[in-house]
Image (cartoon, rainbow, N blue to C red):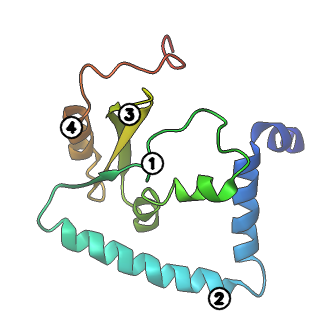
Amino acid sequence: MYEKTRAEGFGAEVKRRIMLGTYALSAGYYDAYYLRAQKVRALIRRDFDQAFATVDAVLSPTSPTTAFKLGEKLDDPLAMYLNDVYTVPANLAGLPGISVPCGFDSRKLPIGLQLIGRPFDEETLLRIARAAEPSDCPLPPVLEGR
């Protein structure tokens, strides 16, 4: 069952990212990648801590572009990674983050707004997210009725 769920349950992109993570933690690469990454992680967290001394949340785009159609970039792994570039800092810093729709582009595809909050302050983050999300922002047709 374990092998079947891994083979069928994960798409190609998830499998690719698992393999990259496994490679980075493999023998011989631990010092080169993991330890350096931990140092960078501490610097990122410090920058967020400084920002949270004066603000309740950090707002940013969710991705560098508006949404793309389902399956449109499956053959371009680099484009897929680059679409995550704005969401990575919250994960590295161990901070709560949420993405909410904030409108639509000219192709009627959703635009995402990311909010990053203080550690363990999800309540404030969710209140801000609720206020930021347009009340007239309907779900895209693919998600209606779920």
Q: CA distance from mark 4 to mark 3?
A: 25 Å
Image x and y of residue 37, in percent: 53, 79
Q: Amino acid at mark 4?
A: Arg
- Where residue 111 sits, quadrant-wise, is top left
Q: Residue furthest top?
A: 145
What residue would you read off at disc 1?
A: 65
Q: Are marks 4 and 1 in contact (CB under 8 Å)?
A: no
- Check disc 1 and report its element: helix, strand or loop: loop
Residue 117 sits above or below residue 89 on the image: above
Residue closest to the eye, 38 or 114: 114
What residue would you read off at disc 4?
A: 127
- Check disc 4 and report its element: helix, strand or loop: helix
User: Residue 105, which numbered label?
Assistant: 3
Q: CA distance from mark 4 to mark 1?
A: 25 Å
Image x and y of residue 144, in percent: 48, 14
Label 4 vs 1, first from the N-terminus: 1
Label 2 vs 4, first from the N-terminus: 2
